[in-house]
C-alpha cells in the first residue's frame, strides 16, 4: 500500500499554495474517494479522470482508491487538480515510474477523451514551481503562458497519452516557446479632440502623476471621449508591472493568446455592475474590475449611477492599492493599484446651468444627484475638472489638438523624473516626501482653511502640484504649480 505523491497548487488570489496529491490503492470494497476539503468541481474530477483513463484503455482496479489533498485544512477549488490526480494514479498503477515525476508539479483539466484543457492561474503555478525548484506539467495551449512565470522546465502536453509517452521515452514533448506581444497602436488619439484645452491639460497631469480624476459636464461634452484617449498617452508597463497584470488576467481566465500584457489595462464597467464584479469575490473568488485595472485605468462613466455600496467599496483600495476579501475560511487579497477616472453629469437631467434646457427642479436636482458621491470618496479624488461643451458653430472651425505621441513624450519624461527622484509616482507620496517653500506653505495653509481640506486632501493637493511642477521641468513646487493644483479641488461646487 505505497503512497504516491504528486505536487500541485491551490491559489489564494494569485498566490500559489503548495498542495500534495497523495494516492493510495488498497484492498477493500471498490471505491474512489477524494478527501482534503475539496469543492464540488474537485470531487467531480474522479469521473473525468476515470473516463480519461478508460479512453486510453486503462481500467482502474476493483480496489479502494483514496486521494488525499494535503494540507487538508485549505479549501481546494477548481478543475486543475484533474491532471495531478491522474498522474498520481498512473504512478500507483506502475505505468509511469515515480522518480520521473519527483521534479515536476502539475496543473490541468482533463476532458473525457484524455485531452488536457486550459485552466486559470498557470503563471502563478509556474512561480510556485520555481520556488520549489521543480518543472511544471500544464496544458499544451498554455505552454507559452507558463513560461511567463519563470525559466523552468515546462512540459506542455496536449493529452494524457503524450505525457505517458514522454516519460517512457517513446515521444518527447517539444518545449514551448515564449510568445512576444505584438506592437499594437491605440484606436483613439487626442488629435481627434478639438478645443477642450483645460480638460486635456487636466488629463495630461493625471496621466503624468497617476492621479485619480473626476470630469463633470453636460451630456455630449466629451467626457468619455477624453477618458478613452488616456491610454494613448501612458507609457507601456515595466517588466514587473507586466508580470503582475498578466498574472491577474491569468487568474481570471481572461488572458488572450498566452502573451504578456504590455500596455496599461483600461476597464470600463457599466454602471449596473455589482459590488462583487467591481471589487472581486463571488462563490469562487475571482479578481474584480479594480484588480483587472491594476497598473491601469478604471473608467466609471455615469459615476453617481453606480450603487452606493459599489462606490464606497472603492475607498480602501484607492488608498492601499489592494483589496482584501474576507471569507469564512480565509482572507484573499488581490492587487488593485488602479487609476480612477470618473465622469458624471452636473445633475440628473444633465443640463444644470443651461437656462434653455435645464429642468424646473434646478438647483435641487443637482444637489440630490451629486450627493450620491460621499465626502470620503470625493476626498480621495485628486483632480476635479469641469468640461464645457464646444458650441456647435465652432466645431468645424476649431483646429485639431496635439497628437497623443507628442503628449505621451511629456508624460514619459515627467514619470522618469519622478522615478529618479523617489522611485514611484507622485500619487504614492506622503507629506514628508514633499518639500515646500515658505511662500507656497502660506498659500496651502490659507487654501486649506478656505476650502476646508482634510489632511488627505492637502496631501493629494501637494501631489498634483508636484506633478504640475514636473511637467514644467521645475525642481520644486512654486506658486503657479500650487495655484493650478488648487483649481482642481473645488469640491464645494459639486
Image (cartoon, helix red, strand yellow):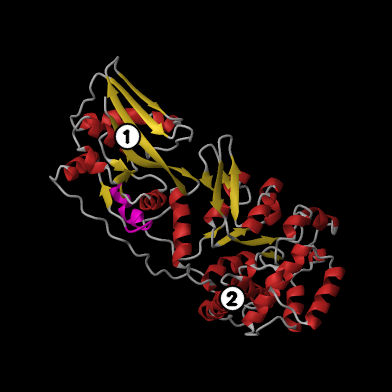
Nearest the viewer among 127 and 483 is: 127
Specify start and end residues of the magenta stretch as a single range: 137-151
Which residue is located at x 30 percent, y 31 percent?
Answer: 49
Q: Quadrant of residue 297?
A: bottom right
Q: Position of residue 184 (x, y in %)?
A: 41, 68
Taking the image as shown, residue 65 lies to the left or right of residue 286, namely left
Label located before the other in sequence (1 or 2)? 1
Residue at the top extreme? 29
Crowd band around label 2 with a 10 angstrom C-alpha radius: few (<14), some (14–19), many (20+): some
Is residue 479 part of the magenta span, yes or no? no
**What numbered label is drawn on residue 300?**
none
- Residue matched to label 2: 418
Compared with 319, 410 (above or below) is: below
Considering every residue shown, the one lying at the far left of the view is 170
* Residue at the spot of label 1: 85
Expressed as whole percent of the image width and height from the top left, the position of residue 207 reads: 59, 71
Q: In screen coordinates, is 38 left or right of 45? A: right
Q: Is residue 168 above or below residue 345?
A: above
Please state the horizontal and vertical placement of residue 53, each as a whole percent of the image: 24, 31
In what quadrant of the picture does the N terminus appear?
top left
Residue in view at x 51 percent, y 61 percent? 265
User: Which residue is drawn at the image coordinates 43% and 61% (left, top)?
Assistant: 261
Visible in this render: residue 464? yes
Q: Residue reaching furthest front?
A: 2
Q: Specify whether residue 389 is in view.
A: no
Amino acid at each position: 500500500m505505497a503512497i504516491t505523491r504528486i505536487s500541485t497548487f491551490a491559489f489564494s488570489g494569485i498566490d500559489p499554495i503548495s498542495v500534495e496529491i497523495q494516492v493510495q490503492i488498497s484492498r477493500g470494497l471498490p471505491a474512489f474517494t477524494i478527501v482534503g476539503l475539496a469543492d464540488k468541481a474537485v470531487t467531480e474530477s474522479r469521473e473525468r479522470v476515470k473516463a480519461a483513463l478508460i479512453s486510453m484503455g486503462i481500467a482502474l482496479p476493483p480496489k479502494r482508491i483514496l486521494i488525499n489533498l494535503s494540507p487538508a485544512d485549505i479549501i481546494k477549488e477548481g478543475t486543475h487538480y484533474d491532471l495531478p490526480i491522474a498522474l498520481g494514479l498512473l504512478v500507483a498503477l506502475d505505468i509511469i515510474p515515480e522518480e520521473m515525476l519527483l521534479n515536476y508539479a502539475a496543473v490541468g483539466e482533463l476532458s473525457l477523451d484524455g485531452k488536457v484543457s486550459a485552466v486559470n492561474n498557470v503563471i502563478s503555478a509556474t512561480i510556485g514551481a520555481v520556488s520549489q525548484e521543480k518543472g511544471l506539467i500544464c496544458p499544451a495551449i498554455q505552454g507559452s503562458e507558463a513560461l511567463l512565470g519563470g525559466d523552468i522546465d515546462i512540459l506542455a502536453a496536449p493529452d494524457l497519452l503524450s505525457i505517458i509517452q514522454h516519460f517512457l521515452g517513446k515521444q518527447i514533448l517539444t518545449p514551448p516557446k515564449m510568445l512576444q506581444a505584438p506592437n499594437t497602436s491605440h484606436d483613439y488619439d487626442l488629435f481627434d479632440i478639438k478645443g477642450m484645452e483645460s480638460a486635456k491639460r487636466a488629463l495630461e497631469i493625471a496621466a503624468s502623476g497617476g492621479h485619480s480624476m473626476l470630469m463633470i459636464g453636460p451630456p455630449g461634452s466629451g467626457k468619455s471621449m477624453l477618458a478613452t484617449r488616456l491610454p494613448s498617452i501612458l507609457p507601456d508597463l515595466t517588466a514587473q508591472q507586466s508580470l503582475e497584470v498578466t498574472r491577474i488576467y491569468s487568474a481570471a481566465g481572461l488572458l488572450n493568446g498566452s502573451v504578456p500584457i504590455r500596455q496599461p489595462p483600461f476597464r470600463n464597467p457599466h454602471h449596473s455592475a455589482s459590488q462583487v464584479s467591481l471589487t472581486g469575490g463571488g462563490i469562487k473568488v475571482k479578481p474584480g474590475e479594480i484588480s483587472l485595472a491594476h497598473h491601469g485605468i478604471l473608467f466609471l462613466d455615469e459615476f453617481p449611477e453606480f450603487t452606493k455600496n459599489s462606490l464606497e467599496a472603492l475607498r480602501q483600495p484607492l488608498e492601499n492599492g489592494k483589496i482584501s476579501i474576507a471569507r469564512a475560511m480565509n482572507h484573499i487579497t488581490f492587487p488593485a493599484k488602479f487609476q480612477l477616472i470618473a465622469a458624471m453629469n452636473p445633475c440628473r437631467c444633465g443640463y444644470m446651468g443651461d437656462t434653455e434646457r435645464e429642468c424646473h427642479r434646478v438647483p435641487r436636482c443637482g444637489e440630490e444627484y451629486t450627493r450620491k458621491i460621499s465626502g470620503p470618496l470625493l476626498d480621495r479624488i485628486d483632480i476635479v475638472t469641469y468640461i464645457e461643451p464646444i458650441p456647435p458653430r465652432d466645431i468645424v472651425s476649431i483646429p485639431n489638438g496635439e497628437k497623443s505621441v507628442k503628449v505621451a513624450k511629456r508624460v514619459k519624461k515627467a514619470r522618469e523624473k519622478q522615478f529618479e527622484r523617489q522611485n514611484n509616482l507622485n500619487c504614492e507620496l506622503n507629506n514628508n516626501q514633499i518639500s515646500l517653500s515658505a511662500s507656497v506653505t502660506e498659500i496651502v495653509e490659507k487654501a486649506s482653511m478656505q476650502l476646508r481640506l482634510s489632511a488627505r486632501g492637502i496631501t493629494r493637493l501637494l501631489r498634483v502640484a508636484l506633478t504640475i511642477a514636473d511637467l514644467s521641468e521645475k525642481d520644486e513646487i512654486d506658486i503657479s504649480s500650487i495655484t493650478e493644483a488648487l483649481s482642481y479641488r473645488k469640491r464645494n461646487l459639486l
